[in-house]
Image (cartoon, rainbow, N blue to C red):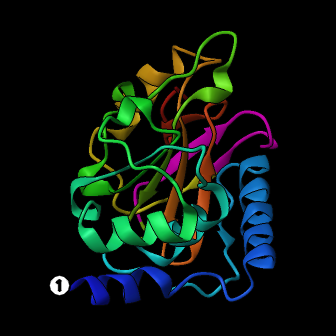
Amino acid sequence: MSTADLSAIAVAGGFAEPVFGAQGVFRALMDATARPGTVVPLAVEVAPPAPLGVGAGAIALALCDADTPVWLSPSLRGDTVAAWIAFQCGAPLSDDEGKADFAFAPAAEAPGLCALSQGSQEYPDRSTTLVLEIEALEGGERLTLQGPGIDGSRVIAPRGLPADFLAARADNRLLFPRGIDVVLVAGSEILALPRSTVIAATDMEAR
């Protein structure tokens, strides 16, 4: 791909109105985080280069900047997505997921939660946020959520989670208040699983 073609891709597909677009996505993320397990639409139109999805691209535009190192999974690490992130967000790309503020990956390339930055006891908010693209937010294995923002319990059924997600999440919960916040993305919809939320296969003990 020529430099001119790469430049054309990098400058296209961002928010039509950056301030309002970023604010809208940020509000949606706050809503999703305050109500874990609730599917929230991102009412914005963006067109990141493939294979980065629309929802993940919108989150990158809203949250990533020059002060937030970003880790991309192998399939996202090509020239087009990297150039788009660099131009649209100004965010530095990190080869080390343990030093990234945000990590983006499809489920098939999900990094181990233990490999990401867990924050510290003094600054647990300095952990990595994992933006994980999956097949769909409905139609999969039923999972029960409990914790802050949930009245009793809430059942979700995301489709296409990594096979070891529940076990990895259970191990990660042992580090609380440190740990990883996860945002599941399918198309232009999101579902947040903050570290304070306990997750279990339905009819099993929450973990």
Looking at the picture, does residue 147 appear above or below residue 40?
Answer: above
Q: Residue furthest left?
A: 1
Q: Which residue is found at the position 32% from the left and 79% from the top? A: 50
Task: Decide which of 1, 31 is in the foreground and name it.
Answer: 1
Report the number of discs.
1
Whether the magenta-drawn stretch holds residue 41 is answered as no
In the rendered image, is residue 137 in sight? Answer: no
Name the spot of residue 114 as percent of width and height, x first.
Answer: 37, 24
Name the spot of residue 4 as percent of width and height, x first.
Answer: 30, 89
Q: Label 1 sits on what residue type?
A: Met
Quadrant where the N terminus sits is bottom left
Task: Decide which of 114, 152 is in the foreground and name it.
Answer: 114
Task: Decide which of 103, 189 is in the foreground and name it.
Answer: 103
Residue bearing mark 1:
1
Magenta range: 140-154
Name the spot of residue 166 as percent of width and height, x first.
Answer: 40, 36
Name the spot of residue 204 as percent of width and height, x first.
Answer: 48, 32
Q: Which residue is found at the position 82% from the left and 43% from the top? A: 151
Q: Residue furthest front?
A: 3
- The residue tagged with tag 1: helix, strand or loop? loop
Q: Quadrant of residue 88?
A: bottom right
Whether the magenta-drawn stretch holds residue 150 is answered as yes
Characterize the local packing of mark 1: few (<14), some (14-19) or many (20 or more) Cα atoms within 10 angstroms: few
Q: Quadrant of residue 176?
A: top right
Along the horizontal axis of the image, is 82 left or right of 200?
left
Q: Which residue is found at the position 65% from the left and 82% from the top? A: 15
Which SS does the magenta portion mostly show? loop
